[in-house]
Amino acid sequence: MMKKILVFLLLLCLTSYTVRAQTFYSAYGDWQETSNMVDNTELQEGKVEYKYKFYQERQNFTEDYYGLLENPLDYPYKSLEKKVMDFSLWSIEKPEEQEDRVIEEKTVYPYQILQQINSLTIFDALGSGGKLWITEIEVLYKNEKIPFNISCEGCSNIKLEWFNDNDTKQDDTKLSYLYPSDKLRLDLLQKYDLKDLAINVYIADPLDSGDSNFTVTVNDYVNNDYYVMAKRAYWIHSSPGDVFIDRIKLLDYMVNPHWEDTIYESDEEVSKSIDVYPLEPVTYYRYQDTKYLYYQMVRDYTDNYFFSYLDNWVRDDENKISVYYQRSREKIIVNDDIHITKNYLDVDDIITYSTVPISNLMIRNNINWNVPGQYMIEILYSGLHVRIPIIYDYALEEVNGVKEDTNNKESTQKPKVVPIANKNDISVSTSQSKLNSKQIVWFLILLLGIILMVYSLKKIVDRKKS
């Protein structure tokens, strides 16, 4: 039972000591930029906003034109700017088909022709008396005489120019003869087609008649791989001074065709003949590409960062910076039950806490200091306007018809605006409670102490008795 009484008295003390109050906040001030993020508290707020860089895109083109898949990797986009290229050279390789490529093909007919002639050789010459008399040699191409040079292997006691001096008559003073072992070479100075080449050999026999023969070959030969071999044999029966003309068309004596290494081509099919050897047809290809300028997209950025969008610019959401802001407000705590028992205002009776220096507050009242009653006090600060009801209850005595303060006898007339002492943040404390409340609390504390003392003495007496 005693414990319950003690708990009750303790709660009564605490309840009696509680001062009722109201809290007022000013409006938040303007946002101010700060270097760091500010956490939200009762009296301040923080926020972050982002500034972005903006860009415009433009096309950056290649200097050259490129075909499909030929463009540089860093220029991935194909423009409409194009250029039709020249056709490639003809090739047997078929080009790959691809976009914007024109492919042409044709069939050609390759062939070879007989090897051209640049020299003739006369050997195995034999006539009456063991040698063959030749008064003149002529080489004809398309029935026209052509020039040549003469050399001889084994010839002796003769003048080579006698074989080609434009004199076909027999002359005993001209020792133009060949023995079987002699080789007379005619250098044609250039190459000629075999089919149009012929040779005239003028033969005479001072002994009137007898067997005559010789052999003509063309070009140099290796391992008896003769190209042309014209073996001629005669029975000459003539009078002294007669000359026999032997015209030899060399193509008629071809024994082993020698073909040119050069391959000739015809757009039309070629038939095989004595002097033409056709090869397998060949398909040729060529192509023509249309090439384009390629481009890359390049971003031109603004130099600065911006909050808002810019006309005709694109915001880069990845390229941004953070801008931090903070704003704050003021807090004032005032007593909710103000009972003035003196003839002046004490700020401690009104304000229990303020983040604003007290000297910056304006406190106005409408108290008639001669008349106790209920009045209003106003507290003003930067848009904060607090109206608080108060009870003014101060006893005045009338002396000679004038009410006077019985304590200090001072005049009761007070200004409506009361200056407040220069005092910064004031925290709530017991000194801010009303005087009557203090007295009650002290009385209850004293009573509690007496009860505790009596209770303790009773416990001691009870122990001694037991």
Image: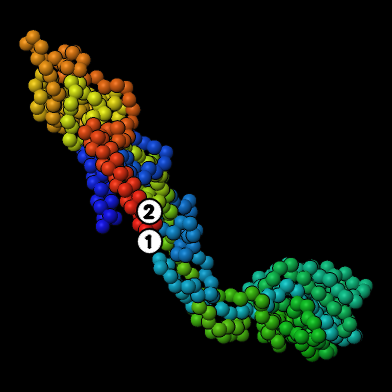
Q: Which residue is label 2 attached to?
A: 460
Is residue 227 or residue 171 the one in the foreground? Answer: 227
Quadrant in which residue 222 is drawn: bottom right
Is residue 210 or residue 341 the one in the foreground? Answer: 341
What kind of residue is marked 1? Ser
Q: On the picture, is 43 further left or further right than 384?
A: right
Name the mark on residue 466. Answer: 1
What kind of residue is marked 2? Ile
Q: In this view, does 149 lie above or below 251?
A: above
Q: Residue at x 13, y 26 (%)?
A: 393
Q: Residues within 10 Å of mark 1 (few under 14, many from 20)?
A: few
Quadrant in which residue 128 is drawn: bottom right
Spot occupied by residue 357 in the image (x, y as percentages of width and height):
31, 27
Q: Which residue is drawn at 61% across and 85% down?
A: 274
Q: Residue at x 76, y 85 (%)?
A: 225
Q: On the picture, is 131 further left or further right than 276?
A: right
